[in-house]
Amino acid sequence: MKDKEIDIEALQDFYKGLCELIGVDAMLAVYQHYRGSQLTIPTHLYDRKRASQQVVQKYTGNNSMQLARKYGYSQKWVRKVIRDNKNKG
């Protein structure tokens, strides 16, 4: 399908919203790839295990708030990750 063939006003609400958010081409790519699938969108953008590995690598001793904001977890969680990593080593 091409952009010119898409009647945006007739789209399902989900696809119409997606089209408005990311554009027709990207919406069609999502449609083609996932159509018929049940999707669950995770609350967090970053995977907890992978984010914790990055936190350990990027922690400088005084940037827990910045890391918490970057990865979308609490500062308490960042401190726990750092503490748990110190206890391993």
Image (cartoon, rainbow, N blue to C red):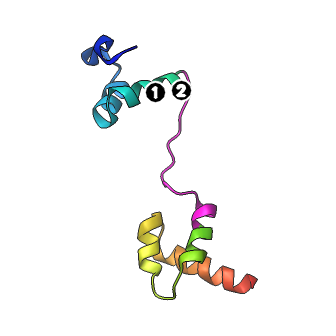
Residues marked 2 and 1 touching at CB (< 8 Å): yes
Q: Residue at x 36, y 15 (%)?
A: 2
Label 2 Cα neighbours within 10 Å, binned few <14 / some 14-19 / many ≥20? few
Residue 46: image x %, image y %? 52, 57
Q: Which residue is mark 2?
A: 33
Near mark 1 (Cα within 10 A), the count class, few <14, some 14-19 or many ≥20, is few
Residue drawn at x 60%, y 76% is 56
State which quarter of the image contains the N terminus: top left
Q: CA distance from mark 2 to mark 1?
A: 6 Å
Quadrant in the picture for the C terminus: bottom right
Q: Amino acid at mark 2?
A: His
Find disc 1 in the rendering and name its residue.
Answer: 29
Confirm whether the magenta stretch covers residue 43. Answer: yes
Label disc, if present, on residue 59 of the rendered structure: none
Q: Would residue 61 appear left or right of 84 to someone viewing this image? A: left
Q: Quadrant of residue 63?
A: bottom left
Whole-percent x, y for residue 40 in the image: 53, 39
At a point 46% along the width and 29% down the height, the residue shown is 30
